[in-house]
Structure formats: structure tokens, C-alpha cells
Image (tube, rainbow, N blue to C red):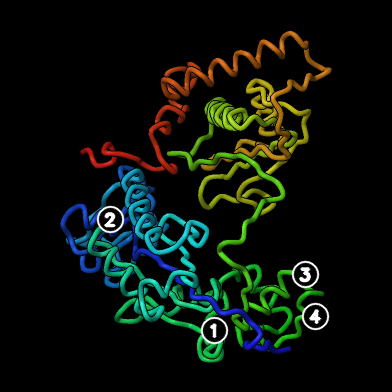
Amino acid sequence: MTFDYKKEERRDVLCIDVKSFYASVECVQRGLHPLREMLVVMSHAENTGGLVLASSPMAKKKLGISNVMRKWDLPNHPELKIVPPRMKLYIKENMKINNIYKNYVAEEDLLIYSIDESFLDLTASRHLFASSTYEFARKIQKQIFDETGLYVTIGIGDNPLLAKLALDNAAKHNHDFIAEWHYESVPQTVWKIEPITEMWGIGTRTAKRLKRLGIYSVYDLAQASPHLLKERIGMIGEQLHAHAWGIDRSKLSDTYTPIEKSYGNSQVLPRDYLKQAEIEIVIREMADQVAARIRRHHAQTKCISLFIGYSMGYRDSNGKGGFHQQLKIPVTSSTKLLTEYCIEIFRNNWHGQEIRHVGITYSQLVYTDSIQLDLFHDPDEQIQELKLDLLIDTIRKKYGYTSLIHANSITTGGTAVSRSSLVGGHAGGMDGIQE
């Protein structure tokens, strides 16, 4: 099966990424050149297990440093600078950059893909600012550098997929940090992507499934039967076949409503937790925090899930590094009940392993302000608990989370107080650069 590109709509799409965003922002803030300085942004740098969140291009090139490396993996180099994260600053710079984009495209033609990456559909506005898409890209590059000191790489394509593939696989290797991929160049560009896991949408698991079908490369995927792929892999197989031909019929202006929404929270603990009492303190804190989130959205949950990740490198007798369990429950938003359910799941599945990762999610939401009474609990008590939850929510909203906390949160096991000032799980403000 082949595609007739003459029948495919062509749009002017840019995929723009800030090079090593966190590290580059820190370099600019210190008056350093973001492409020439060796710098890494490390979360919890004070601990031996500190995690690299971002590294500058020069640190990657000269020292081989990559994201998610641990502190103990870093080479001892005198020119390497290690700095803590400042998430509020990164969000501020991200907003500044995306406000630049809004000068050139309508809101519906801008998709903020992540904190350092955005898609722009220039089809309706390109002629107002430049004679070509490439010239437009250079114009945006220059304005971002002039206003922020940051370098961006840009992929140009006939659709969002081709723009993304051009960005990820070619732009960073070009002297101008721009790559342009179109339908006609698919055999010379998309089909040459190696290994197959470098193709957008194909991870290691999908690659293994494709390998069992005799598909080892993007070219193999393009030549495979879409009917066989759909039969063996499902709809995703048919979609991947289209992607191998550079086909993507989505538009940034298309709206998408998720079938189901859920709310959750997860954290990597500052150390391994072995004591049951300490682990349960963290679970109680997180159950409380997520319960407040669903109440804020006038929702109640019918299903909770708890994820527990063991200490790094540990595997149980079944070869698993943790457990993930769900529990169907009567509809509720009560902090007390939700906490009890989470603790019940934990006690039924934990067998003394050291814990490093905890996650809680509430799903199958029901949006209502009415009280769903549980036949197994006293109705007056349920009403009083709801009033108490709403009162606590109001106080915390006005005076901050730490204005009203459980006493066990200030014990050695609690993490809620220390996390209350974090943004995205990392240091958020100027406290992140204090000695």
C-alpha cells in the first residue's frame, strides 16, 4: 500500500524546541554561553542520588552526560557546574517564549507540547510575516534569542508529524538548527531513521512487537501490510504504517476531549523507606492532597489506584520492581475514606520491601455537588466529614497548604511540608539557589 501525496493536505507547521532548556536558562542567568558552558541542572544535588534533569550541549558532547543520570555517574571535571532547579523561572521563560509565538499565530494554531517544545501552524498567517516557511522560522529564532538569549531548534513539515520528526532527527545536526521535511523527501528522511525506536511513537515494547512481524526498520514498516499490522497490533499498527509514510492528518486547531479524566500525584522519596509507619504517613499525605484536588473540581471518585515502587534495583520473587493495584469503591470525595482505602491496598500488597516511589490516582470521576451517602457509614458522620474537608480546603486555599497539616507530617517520615514549595516536584524559587 502506498499513499498519493497529491491528495494529502499540506500545511506549514513548525515544531520548535529550546536546546537543553533548563540548563540553557541557568547559563543565561549566570552570563554564560548556553552552547559552550558545561553545566547540569540536578535535583536533590545535596544527596548522593541526585538526579540530572538537564545538561548543556557541551556537557553532553564532552563528558557524555545525559538526562536522568545520577550524581554518582557524573565525571569529576573541574569545569562542570552543578546547579539546583528553579521551576518557577523555567515556567516564566516558557511563557515568555510562547507569548512570542502568539504574535504570529492564533491561539488555536499554537500547541504547547511540553515546557520546552511547541507546535505552530503557520498556514493562515505565514504570508503576513515572511515569503517562506524557512524565513519565518529564522525570524522566530532570532526574536527568541534577542529577548531571552536562548537557542531553539526548529523542524518544518507538511504536517505536525513531519515537523516533529525533522526536529528530533535532523535540526540539531544542522548549522542553522533548522530542518525541513516534506512528503517528497520521505524515502530519504523518514525511512532512514535508525534505530526504529527513534521514530516518534515507537518505544522498545512496540519495537519488539514489530520485530516479531519481521519489521526491523521504518522502511520495513512502510512496506508492510497495513491489514496485517492492524490484525496483529490493532489500530496503532495501522497508524504506525501511515506514519512511516509521513502521513498525519491531524490539525493543531482540532479539539480533543478525553474519554475519562483522572487526578493523581506521585513522588520519588528522598530516601528508601522501610518502616511501615513512615510509608503510611506519605500515603496519607498524598491521599489527602489528591482528594482536595477532586473536590476542587466538584468531583467524586469510584476507583482508586496505588503504585508502590521498590528501592532502585530491587526485584521481588516475581521479578517486579513494585506493585500497582486498583480498587473499586462507593462514590466519595472524603479524605478519611479515601485514605483508608489507600492504606488497605498498601497493607494487602506490601511485604516489607524498601520503598522509593509512591503514586496515587483517583479515576472514574462523577461530577456533582451532591453527597453520595454510603450505606455502611453513619449519614450524619459523613456529612460532618464533608464539611470538615471543605473547611480545611478553604483554609489551605487562603493561607497555604502548610497552614493546616496533620501532626505526623512534621515527623521524619513526612514529605508534604517540604514538597509544598515545589513546582513540578522540584525547587521552584530563589530557595533553589541558596547555599
Of callouts 1 and 2, the N-terminal one:
2
Screen quadrant of the C terminus: top left
User: What amino acid is found at the position of numbered circle 4 in the picture?
Assistant: His
Count numbered badges in the picture: 4
Q: Which residue is mark 2?
A: 25
Q: Secondary structure at mark 4?
A: helix
Please state the horizontal and vertical placement of residue 298, each as a whole percent of the image. 64, 29
The residue at which mark 1 appears reads as 190
Q: Earlier in the sequence, mark 3 or mark 2?
A: 2
Residue at 60% of width from left, 69% of height from top? Answer: 201
Q: Looking at the picture, how far across and down is residue 193, in whole percent? A: 52, 82
- State the CA–CA distance, disc 3 to disc 2: 42 Å
Q: Earlier in the sequence, mark 1 or mark 3?
A: 1
Residue that label 4 marks: 227
The front one of 387 and 272 is 387
Judge the density around disc 2: few (<14), some (14-19), many (≥20) Cα neighbours within 10 Å.
many
Q: Residue at x 66, y 44 (%)?
A: 261
| Vertical relation: 430 (above or below) 332 | below
The amino acid marked with disc number 3 is Gly
> For mark 3, what is the residue?
234
Q: CA distance from mark 1 to mark 2?
A: 32 Å
Q: In the rendered image, is residue 52 in sight?
A: no
Query: Residues at badges 3 and 2 in contact (C-beta under 8 Å)?
Result: no
Q: Is residue 100 left or right of residue 210?
A: left
The quadrant in which the N terminus is found is: bottom right
Q: Earlier in the sequence, mark 4 or mark 2?
A: 2
Marks 1/3 in contact by CB < 8 Å: the verdict is no
Residue 121 drawn at (x, y percent): 49, 68
Q: Secondary structure at mark 3?
A: loop
Mark 3, Cα crowd under 10 Å, few <14 / some 14-19 / many 20+, is: few
